[in-house]
Image: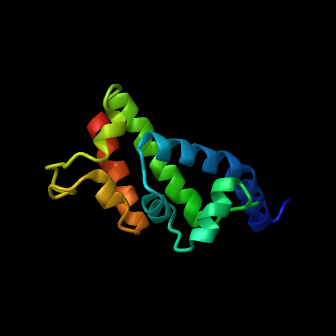
């Protein structure tokens, strides 16, 4: 039976490349600035961000994979709900109580993974 921590690290290693490529495609679709991308990924170091963007990283932390998973879920949900305007929705002011008149990207780039979760839950709830 394989060691579970080693198996999890192997899963992260296998997921790192596809997760980062997907994240950067979504960031482009949403027209995110570098600082917004770093906040979504939970990064403070620009050099680490640049390495990740170049694909020069073997394995990203579990936290970053979780963040990317939420971003992907939000992206997918928006494209189901709003096929023509999904990518613009993230920047539009939103009157829903969780946004308080601000945009979804403002909420998502707070730096807290919990805010990504909340936006993901909101989008999923809108889908029904």
Q: Is residue 6 left or right of residue 65?
A: right
Of residues 40 and 97, the one nearer the viewer is 40
Q: Residue at x 37, y 37 (%)?
A: 87
Seen in the picture, residue 127 relative to 51 is either above or below; the reply is above
Q: Residue furthest right?
A: 1
Q: List x then y, in percent, for residue 7.
A: 77, 59
Residue 81 visible, this angle: yes
Q: Residue at x 13, y 49 (%)?
A: 95
Q: Quadrant of residue 80?
A: top left
Of residues 3 and 45, the one nearer the viewer is 45
Q: Quadrant of residue 25?
A: top right
Q: Quadrant of residue 51?
A: bottom right
Q: List x then y, in percent, for residue 36.
A: 42, 60
Q: Considering the image in quadrants, where does the N terminus appear?
A: bottom right
Q: List x then y, in percent, for residue 38.
A: 49, 63
Q: Residue at x 69, y 54 (%)?
A: 54
Q: Is residue 23 left or right of residue 79?
A: right
């Amino acid at each position: 039976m394989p060691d579970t921590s080693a198996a999890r690290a192997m899963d992260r290693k296998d997921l790192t490349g596809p997760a980062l490529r997907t994240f950067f495609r979504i960031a482009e679709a949403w027209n995110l600035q570098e600082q917004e991308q770093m906040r979504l990924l939970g990064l403070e170091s620009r050099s680490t961000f640049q390495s990740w963007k170049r694909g020069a990283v073997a394995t990203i932390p579990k936290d970053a994979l979780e963040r990317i998973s939420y971003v992907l879920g939000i992206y997918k949900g928006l494209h189901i709900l709003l096929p023509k305007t999904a990518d613009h929705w993230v920047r539009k002011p939103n009157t829903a109580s969780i946004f308080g008149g601000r945009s979804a990207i403002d909420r998502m780039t707070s730096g807290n993974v919990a805010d990504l979760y909340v936006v993901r839950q909101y989008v999923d709830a809108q889908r029904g």
